[in-house]
Amino acid sequence: MRPLELFKGSFGSEPQPLPPYETLILQSRRALSPLLTGEHDTPLAGEGLEFLEIDDYTPGDDVRRINWRASARSAHPVVNRFARRRRLEVWLVYLAGGGMLCGDPISKHRVASTLLVALSDAAHRMGDTPRVLLYRKGAESFLADASRYAPRRLYEQLSTLVLEGHHAPIQGAVEWLQNRLRRRSLIVLVGDFFEPMDLSPLAARHELLALQVRTPEEIDPVDSGLYRDPASRRESRLALDPLRRQRYKKALQNLDRDNRVHLDSLGIPQGRFLTDEDPFPALAALLGARR
């Protein structure tokens, strides 16, 4: 087993099913509603502001638009005027490989599904119809549903989604999107990111967010446990000697460092979600930073 192959395994029993839809939506709205209300830009609207001009302040203008430096020079308050850019399409992209079955009792697939349904519901509440790409090696599922029940349809699709193979190649999804997206879009990538990535082709035209889902055992593997290969579903007892454990952790740290440097160079925000933690605080923090 090469150092980075440990992620293909799962420790323990079959992953739990997704939480009830109503429970998931309630938790999501409690966490994200403060970000989705008010007159100001929302983090998933796929819509931005473009600077237009500096103008004199008039009563009723948002005081947060005051340009204090220009006001000091002109001896009276002035504000920045902005023009609203064209609304962006929102894409939710799930890298749905078999490795997402890892995790006991909560699987990475359960956490990823929670994030995807929460984001779909948030986008619909703001009047968007997000496009959803469930990307698997050799098989893509594209969902676009304008009905008010689209988040529930996504939930049902994810509840029955068959995850096969070890991973869904990131570059395959990048190529798929690059060949089909004609409009500037907001793309949210959800996966475990266990391979080097090059998002430069997408970042040149689109806005991106990266949501990494991992188990604690993948970051700091236990000395022994039940190994399940998600491709063959065969199980075996796994024991790690100290050297192999050290090599694995070092290889993973190097991979994550390189990917983080790459994302930072492109200005792509990234959030990490662990299967033993509530995903909503981290999601709210990531979206709040984008406002």
Image (cartoon, rainbow, N blue to C red):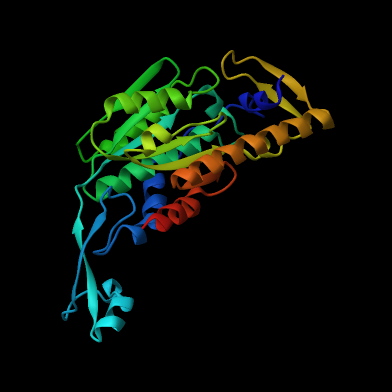
Q: Is residue 248 left or right of residue 190?
A: right
Q: Quadrant of residue 209?
A: top left
Tell me which residue sits at (37%, 34%) in the image: 202
User: In x, y percent, where is residue 284?
Assistant: 43, 55
Foreground residue among 215 and 169:
169
User: In x, y percent, where is residue 182?
Assistant: 24, 31
User: In x, y percent, where is residue 264?
Assistant: 50, 46
Foreground residue among 159 and 251:
251
Tell me which residue sits at (60%, 16%) in the image: 233
Q: Is residue 215 left or right of residue 245?
A: left
User: In x, y percent, where is residue 260?
Assistant: 55, 42
Q: Is residue 285 visible?
A: yes
Foreground residue among 96 and 234:
96
Residue extending furthest toward the right = 242
Q: Is residue 39 left or right of residue 287?
A: left
Q: Is residue 160 visible?
A: no
Residue extending furthest toward the front = 73
Vertical placement of residue 41 versus 182, above or below: below
Vertical placement of residue 68 versus 134, above or below: below
Foreground residue among 80 and 2:
80
Q: Which of the image's four quarters has the C terminus?
A: bottom left
Tell me which residue sits at (23%, 44%) in the image: 128
Vertical placement of residue 157 versus 210, above or below: above
Tell me which residue sits at (41%, 58%) in the image: 288
